[in-house]
Amino acid sequence: MKSFVDYPENSDFSIHNIPFGVAVFNKEYIACCTRIGDLIVDLATLYDYGFFDEINGLDENVFEAYTLNEFIELGKPVTNAVRLKLQQILGEDSKLANDEKSIADCFFELDQVKMMMPVHVPNYTDFYSSIEHATNVGKMFRDPENALLPNWRHLPVGYHGRASSIVISGTDIIRPKGQMKPPGADSPIFGPSKQLDFELEMAFIVNKNTEMGESISTADAEDAIFGMVLFNDWSARDIQSWEYVPLGPFLGKNFGSSVSPWVVTLEALNPFRTASPKQEPEVLNYLQFEGDKNFDINLEVSIQPENGEENLICQSNFKYMYWNMNQQLAHHTVNGCNVEVGDLYASGTISGQDPNSFGSMLELTWRGQNPLQLSNGTERKFIEDNDTVIMRGFAEKDGIRVGFGEVSGKILPAN
Amino acid sequence: MKSFVDYPENSDFSIHNIPFGVAVFNKEYIACCTRIGDLIVDLATLYDYGFFDEINGLDENVFEAYTLNEFIELGKPVTNAVRLKLQQILGEDSKLANDEKSIADCFFELDQVKMMMPVHVPNYTDFYSSIEHATNVGKMFRDPENALLPNWRHLPVGYHGRASSIVISGTDIIRPKGQMKPPGADSPIFGPSKQLDFELEMAFIVNKNTEMGESISTADAEDAIFGMVLFNDWSARDIQSWEYVPLGPFLGKNFGSSVSPWVVTLEALNPFRTASPKQEPEVLNYLQFEGDKNFDINLEVSIQPENGEENLICQSNFKYMYWNMNQQLAHHTVNGCNVEVGDLYASGTISGQDPNSFGSMLELTWRGQNPLQLSNGTERKFIEDNDTVIMRGFAEKDGIRVGFGEVSGKILPAN
């Protein structure tokens, strides 16, 4: 499959991808869009020009919207048909290749658009599904001999996060202030967090509303998942470690989370499926599943200090996840908890076995004990003011590349 | 102050109250409303008839809406002016008393309306601010000698809850299924919760959007709080106790929470202010406050088994809260977490010192050790199928009564 649009071989946005997002075009007009190579394609205008006329169930111009929610809610039969149609429209033999007016009106250079939050997120849940991450954290904060808590291998541990502070890549994050209790201190102090961290995560977005009391089985889960984004779950470790008992993370997390602008569909990720890690002990029936439910997605994190170059500090992979998305969604709804279109479910920090693959500064520096050396001669225990953290992700196999682009965020000094 | 509408002396909805809600009128028309005695007043039609013409800042008919959010967002200057205007319109000397057309068009009997969720809730947080409740739970599940965790007296512990499953009073709740680990069992089992519980709470609703990085001080908090509701934080104790480490409650809570339909404004609650409990040790600066920030609101809980009568099982009071709403909101935002109009912040279970005032079955029966005897000869350790739990709340002083009505919910058998 080839496109009439030229793009470099290593582009995340090959014709095999066709992700969905929302952009402001020329500072004046907002619409849903896709991306091919380095061109952004305005789907609302494509719709108006009749390119989607043959698609059943796409009766209104749902791309004329500030979010993808209305489109997503149409479900897989429609969203998949639109993606396949776009592969055809953008294909090398497409009529569009010679349709100058449509190209002029629908195709935009990167510097003509500003990406927005792709979806409105009604509910956000964060899981804790990497066994390497949970083990690392357990070793540091609890018992090195019994790092995993007793429930960890029986259910995908998760908690509700804050939806209001999820922001699009490129949004600055202000260093949070809060209570923390330094080691050995008698009482807590107040001030800017000194242990600001990232967490390398991915997240999936749900395409349906369910009723309370309804559950989604592992077999049905993928039908309810529109696609995925990269996710940085910013964390203030000093605030978190003081506040989190007994009800979990709160102010150590809810000051901001960043997402990448392009939602990559499960269908685009299909070629990169891989087996899941063996789960021992065997899980309860409602968590059992069939088929390859993990995805081989290369992930990396860089820190870029102000006026400095990028330093690659972590290389991980989404395939390491112990609990897969099907299990996460089945678990989340097994009690009848209802889901809503646009809900975002994050994986938890994605760490591998290799220390280089640990998905947070907490783990990479082992709580600050082994600072990272940056190319500008400085070192980092945690993230400093004016550092930018950049996460990237892509899958590649048999000459096909499908990627997420990046999610980046710069830390500004505390107010 | 008297109304031209007759109502019993013990009505929660005296002319001193003037709460706000949303109703379906005659199964066909939805609008914001207030209540006086046992009459529901359609505010959208009152607006159309010009009754609010003099109010500055009320330029559109925001009552013609499915939620109160648009009205609330106008802020205290407008919402207070509307409430005061309604006290005048409903007062004994009002022209409206003899305006037969307006009364026919705007006033409805209870059986002509169905109450809806009063607000759209973008974010829901649950605190844990009763020292008696936290102590009881700590004694049962952790260390009786050190029931309160070290952070408890330093900050109002809270966690993010699930917004999607907050429902209006009267909505049935289906018993959740899930994983639990019975005492002594080697591995978890799956099934309907056997320890379904209520939690007697109140919640406040925020009237503004803030930017990320912005904080609301204790001094400014009340200006950002539109009003309060009763809140039942349904809890499945067996699911919760297995899942909750280390990231907090999840499926043990997110299957449903119930709110009362009428939002009672802080202004209506003003006469019932009372001093807060002394906080020892002294709290950090950002949590300090001036004035009477607790409210003397009588709370009670009844269980009504199917085909049986109500059994009063708990009498508590909102004044017992150790952490007040100003402190909760200041803490929640001190790290720059942004709030949104309609956000709901719940108190946590409201227990007093007297065992009769404990706000959950967990505490009332001491984890099932001391079952409650009901008038129909049955006993309860936790809530059984087809039981209805009813919570009521009202404040009363110097002949003035302002109440919340009730929040009720019936438990249906698991699917």
Image (cartoon, coloured by chain):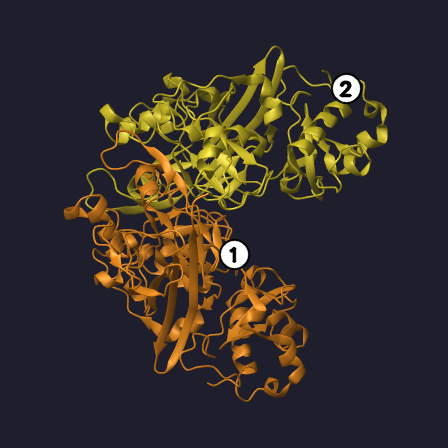
Chain colours: A orange, B yellow
Q: Chain of mark 2?
A: B
Q: What residue is pinned by disc 1? A: A341
Where residue B252 appears, as percent x and y from the top left, is 37, 41
- Depicted A133 relative to depicted B263: above or below: below
Q: What residue is pinned by disc 2? A: B4
Identified at 47% across, 81% down, the residue is A7
- Depicted B36 relative to depicted A62: above or below: above
Q: CA distance from mark 2 to mark 1?
A: 47 Å
For the residue labelled by badge 2, is the local secondary structure a helix, a strand or a loop?
loop
Where residue A298 appears, as percent x and y from the top left, is 33, 69
Identified at 82% across, 23% down, the residue is B97
For the residue labelled by badge 1, is the local secondary structure a helix, a strand or a loop?
loop
Residue closest to the eye, A309 or B160: A309
- Depicted B242 relative to depicted A117: above or below: above
Horizontally, residue B222 falls left or right of residue A330, namely right
| Farthest residue, direction left | A145
Q: Chain of mark 1?
A: A
Where residue A87 appears, as percent x and y from the top left, is 52, 80
Horizontally, residue A117 falls left or right of residue A334, namely right
